[in-house]
């Protein structure tokens, strides 16, 4: 019996390591956008509004692919679905090659959309998989491990890609600005082609991981199996629309993803263009935001629910978001930039708090409610371009006013919105 238990535990640990690697990939690919925005802005000669379509192309895939991903997983199972998601992401990386050679922004956006599509499939499979991979009483521990894997990758991604794409970044900007005509086009072509090697490496890693997952010992689990009590809950209810708190929570999550993406993906441009911080330094600032998120995440692991409830954690997060947002708007220089980085602490606990609050009491409608929350990730496709438009037409620092109504609404949901159970 002891050997059997040891073997089972060993198999579970191997599975956790494999899924942890997948969550690392989630974070790494997602937070490359923070470097791609200023990089493509220079290489493709874009304004702020145009450059933030990087995140639109990436995050809109969650809205488009949430329901199709569920259908694909029903056909393939979770293990093969995760492998397929990695291969789709590899196709997205390949598209970067012709995009770089032709310096065509639309092709870059297509590559990002395809990568987002693969990531949507991968996340739809991996998130429930990690929950049912072991005993329910240790699910929170496994989710915490996955979250840290994700955020550590988010810290590393802009450092690695920024070092490759922005070697001698400030000298490069001065050189490009001094050129014109065919000489400037040649310099921008050389810059655009810097992305080829890292994305070829990424393609190889994604294909290798896809094969490893496919041939791995990961058990195929029935993540859709519902507890009988859950299935019998709310039998008198006819529709998900009888649970208004789900839709209030979906809007809160939509706005949250928008402000989270703004905090991570605008900081490099903002530090460089608005406060004159050299690009060779600013290219690492997105890692500060993600590092702050890791700090907030660790605080949550040790304090929820022992010292504070999820509801209070969400209230505190929203209030911190308002404080740091206003500091970013009114402070000068480096202080303003660091206020954007500190939004990482404010944002860290919002996602894990909104999910259980929005899905509370749904019973047999839980899966439908979850699909709405997954589609809310599209907030990352909508809110950042609004920031970009405001930055172009107003001022990059004052454009951060977009954060304030978002955090005010999250505060409303944390105090009253999650309690609204009937119309």
Image: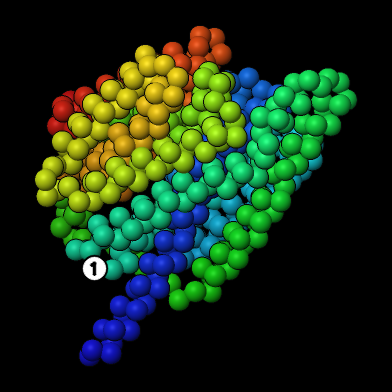
Q: Position of residue 398 (x, y in %)?
A: 44, 13
Does residue 376 sit above or below 276 in this rendering? Answer: below
Please state the total of marks drawn on the protein image: 1
Say which residue appears at 37% left-offset and 77% top-offset: 11
Quarter of the rendering occupied by the N terminus: bottom left
| Residue 310 picture location, percent across and down | 18, 41
Where is mark 1, residue-wise?
135
Instruction: Please state which of residues 363 and 399 is positioned toward the viewer in this rendering.
Output: 399
Q: Quadrant of the C terminus?
A: top left
Residue 146 visible in the shown view: yes
Q: Residue at x 30, y 34 (%)?
A: 346
- Asked which secondary structure carries label 1, the reply is loop
The residue lying toward the viewer, choosing from 91 and 161, is 161
Residue that appears at 25% across and 57% down: 140
Residue 251 picture quarter: top left
423 displayed left or right of 405: left
């Amino acid at each position: 019996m002891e050997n059997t238990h040891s073997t089972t535990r060993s198999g579970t640990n191997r599975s956790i390591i494999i899924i942890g690697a997948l969550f690392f990939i989630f974070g790494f690919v997602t937070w490359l956008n923070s470097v791609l925005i200023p990089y493509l802005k220079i290489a493709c000669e874009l304004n702020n509004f145009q450059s933030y379509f990087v995140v639109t192309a990436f995050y809109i895939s969650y809205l488009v692919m949430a329901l199709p991903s569920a259908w694909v997983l029903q056909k393939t199972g979770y293990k093969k679905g995760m492998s397929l998601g990695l291969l789709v992401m590899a196709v997205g990386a390949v598209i970067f090659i012709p995009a770089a050679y032709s310096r065509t922004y639309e092709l870059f956006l297509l590559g990002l959309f395809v990568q987002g599509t693969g990531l949507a499939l991968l996340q739809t499979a991996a998130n429930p998989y990690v929950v049912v991979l072991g005993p329910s009483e240790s699910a929170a521990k496994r989710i915490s491990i996955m979250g840290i894997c994700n955020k550590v990758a988010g810290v590393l991604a802009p450092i690695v890609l920024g070092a490759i794409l922005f070697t001698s970044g400030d000298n490069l900007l001065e050189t490009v600005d001094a050129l014109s005509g065919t000489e400037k086009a040649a310099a921008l072509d050389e810059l655009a082609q810097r992305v080829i090697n890292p994305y070829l490496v990424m393609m190889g890693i994604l294909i290798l991981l896809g094969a490893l997952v496919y041939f791995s010992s990961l058990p195929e689990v029935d993540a859709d199996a519902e507890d009988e009590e859950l299935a019998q809950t709310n039998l008198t209810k006819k529709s998900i629309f009888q649970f208004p708190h789900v839709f209030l929570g979906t809007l809160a999550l939509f706005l949250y993803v928008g402000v989270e993406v703004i905090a991570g993906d605008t900081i490099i441009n903002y530090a460089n263009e608005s406060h004159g911080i050299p690009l060779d330094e600013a290219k690492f600032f997105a890692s500060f935001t993600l590092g702050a998120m890791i700090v907030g995440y660790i605080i949550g692991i040790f304090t929820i629910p022992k010292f504070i409830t999820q509801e209070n954690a969400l209230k505190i997060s929203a209030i911190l978001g308002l404080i740091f947002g206003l500091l970013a708007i009114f402070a000068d220089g480096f202080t303003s930039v660091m206020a954007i980085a500190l939004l990482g602490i404010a944002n860290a606990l919002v996602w894990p708090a909104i999910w259980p609050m929005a899905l509370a009491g749904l019973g047999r409608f839980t899966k439908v409610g979850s699909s709405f929350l997954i589609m809310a990730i599209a907030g990352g496709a909508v809110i950042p371009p609004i920031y970009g438009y405001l930055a172009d037409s107003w001022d990059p620092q004052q454009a951060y006013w977009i954060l304030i109504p978002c955090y005010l609404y999250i505060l409303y949901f944390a105090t009253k919105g999650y309690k609204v159970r009937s119309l």
